[in-house]
Amino acid sequence: MTNSSPTQLILERRLNAPRALVFQTWTDPVHLAQWWGPRGFTTPVCEVDARPGGTIRIHLQAPDGTLIQTEGVFQEILEPERIVFTNSAFKDDHGEAQLETQYTVTFTEQDTKTKLTVHALVTKAGPGVTPSLSSMESGWNESLDRLATLVDATPSAPSAPFRR
């Protein structure tokens, strides 16, 4: 299910993995770097301090070599149910982010599977970010496809190591 408007995006997925495992993929930088970003993108920098007030910093590298630097702050970490964080990107010549988004991610247990809901609320969209906003839904869908592939390939036990 997908609902979108110019300022928000809501995506839902049912993942074939336990909630604790899916939550871990959002809070462990090694695992987050494996799926964050659209197909073809890599994550050369992925730093996560998953606690209220902690930071998240991710650099995405596009197939053409373009580097997109993002950073944010966690407002809420309620393991394994909910994560709330901000994210900013596309700094201008004065170092001011031109795109700011607040994310609320919920993890709902459904037997041995997880219903994942990602709610993105764009709180600032400066000049020049229209292409990024127009590709936000497709980019997130590709990221969540990569996440589904990762957790589907991982043993069911939440403490099991991820395959690389």
Image (spheres, helix red, strand yellow):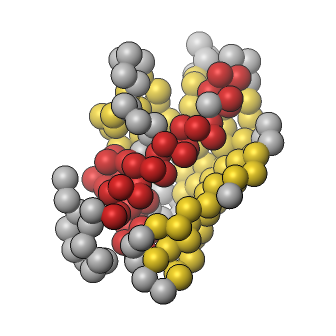
Residue 10 image offset from top left, x and y in percent:
69, 54
Q: Above or below — where is 35 with respect to 65?
A: below
The residue drawn where x is 28% and y is 53% is: 30
Q: Give the side of residue 157 with respect to residue 92, left or right.
A: left
In this rendered view, identify the residue nearer to me: 70 or 19: 19
Within the image, what quadrant is residue 43 found in? top left
Quadrant location of residue 98?
A: top right
Q: Is residue 68 above or below residue 107?
A: above
Q: Position of residue 133 (x, y in %)?
A: 68, 31
Residue sitting nearer the eye, 48 or 1: 1
Q: Pinpoint residue 101: horizontal percent, then vertical percent.
A: 66, 43
Q: Is residue 148 or residue 27 the one in the foreground?
A: 148
Q: Residue at x 71, y 48 (%)?
A: 9
Q: Is residue 107 visible?
A: no
Q: Position of residue 67 (x, y in %)?
A: 41, 23
Please tell me which residue is depicted at 80% across the width and 42% down the height of the picture: 5
Q: How many marks?
A: 0
Identity of the residue drawn at 36% across and 17% down: 65
Name above or below for residue 113 compared with residue 153: below
Say left or right for 16 vs 4.
Answer: left
